[in-house]
Amino acid sequence: MKRLIALFIVLTCFSGTVFSQKKGVGQVKTVVIDAGHGGAKPGAIGKKCKEKELTLQMALKLGKLIEENYPDVTVVYTRKTDVDIDLSERARMANRAKADLFLSIHCNSWSSSTPTGVETYVMGLSQSRANMEVAKKENADPNSPESYVMFAMYQNAYLDKSLDFAQAIQDQYKKSIKTINRGVKQAEIFVLYKTSMPAVLTEVGFISNPEEEAYMMSEAGQNTIVTCIFNAFVEYKSATEGVKKPAKLKNDLKTDGKTSKAPAANETPVVAEPTVTEKPEEVKKETLPESSALVLSTADTHVEAPENIPEPPAQGKTAATEATPATPDAGSQPAEKGKVNVVYKVQFLSSSKPLKEGAKELKGMTDYEYYMQNGVYRYTTGNLASVREATALQKEVRGKGFADAFIVAFNNGERITLQKAKELLEQ
């Protein structure tokens, strides 16, 4: 017990130091690409190859695409050869580089050869057996008492941005790879916890499935996967910086632009995303077991939807006055169809559950609202007509302890990108 208390104190100091070192958000100028495993730690092993080989090949291809299209972006690789890099060191490399984004590439595996599909993880506490299995595979010692204390202390300052990037990756997979889309999930993954920036870990396929392994080994399969991740990076960077995506992008990877098929023993075509009122189809018993508790998004009907999530409040209703009707603000007020009604807010906190008034996570904030996206409650303050006003409020909110607070835009109550807001206001 004394050991755990001492660790708690040390990690508290560490967390404060890490988050105080982060430079201002709003630009994506340094990205760290982490090829999972390496050296004496091969990761998952298929019938014909090892995870460490596939992740390195795809990491190098992805970095090349980013470097060719964004000369102003610094790409840092945790490894470029077959070497074993400690998980803590991978995170330290990203922190030392003051990176704006961290991406770890991995291949999934299961005791059965049947499961297939792609999924992307952000850091978070999970009670899902399947998610825990992924964490055990990717962590050095996830069962130690110290690990539980460490994960419980996780600060989700970068959760919102991590979710945005993770969802962009899954959306791209859905467009281009014909396999099961397992969505965006949370798990206690060490390398994501240690990074002081938006960070995701993507599982690009099941190496334990012979046909999916063959797809990941093929030039066409790798190129399609890498192009998906790159396109997600382009979308994320453009949205974060509030600029248009480049008109022309270089891509010398040999892809035909068509939907690629990742053969699977239990393959089911990707279908349209269900609405929240629809009951998703039951996952076939042969597929990877899934808990519905912390699946943050359901990209198709083959991933179980979250259960027991409270209904979100009407847009514009503050959490502090949830029990009584609130006066709609400019961001939620009904508007005529096609009418531009853009407002800016400062988003300062994300939570997997609604917070009570006065909760310590709010740090004394009383003038706030929240909206729900991908199963996550996102807290905002302000209701402003210009970016200049929002920037001043952002500085004020950061001064209250929310170092990663950022500006978001809404049109008629619907969240839009800053670039879209600019275009609407210029009409």
Image (cartoon, rainbow, N blue to C red):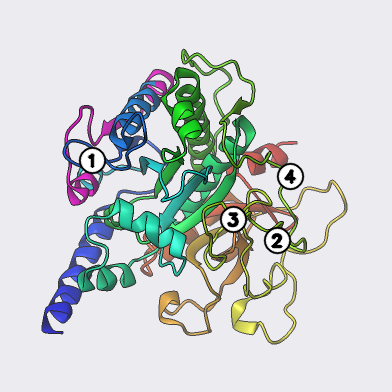
Taking the image as shown, residue 350 lies to the left or right of residue 17, namely: right
Q: Quadrant of residue 5?
A: bottom left
- Tag 1: Cα neighbours inside 10 Å, few (<14), some, or many (≥20)? some
Q: Earlier in the sequence, mark 3 or mark 1?
A: 1
Q: Which residue is mark 2?
A: 331
Mark 1–mark 2 CB contact (< 8 Å): no
Q: Amino acid at mark 2?
A: Gly
Determine the residue positioned at 32% across, 39% down: 45
Taking the image as shown, residue 7 lies to the left or right of residue 201, namely: left
Mark 4–mark 3 CB contact (< 8 Å): no
Q: Which residue is mark 3?
A: 297
Residue 40 percent across, percent down from the top left: 16, 39
Q: Earlier in the sequence, mark 1 or mark 2?
A: 1
Q: Amino acid at mark 4?
A: Ala
- Tag 2: Cα neighbours inside 10 Å, few (<14), some, or many (≥20)? many
Q: Earlier in the sequence, mark 4 or mark 1?
A: 1
Q: Residues in magenta?
A: 65-92
Q: CA distance from mark 1 to mark 2?
A: 38 Å
Does 200 sit above or below residue 129? above
Q: CA distance from mark 2 to mark 3?
A: 24 Å
Q: Which residue is mark 4?
A: 272
Q: Amino acid at mark 1?
A: Ala
Determine the residue positioned at 71% across, 58% down: 280
Mark 4–mark 1 CB contact (< 8 Å): no
- Tag 3: Cα neighbours inside 10 Å, few (<14), some, or many (≥20)? many
Does 265 sit above or below residue 313? above
Q: Which residue is mark 1?
A: 97
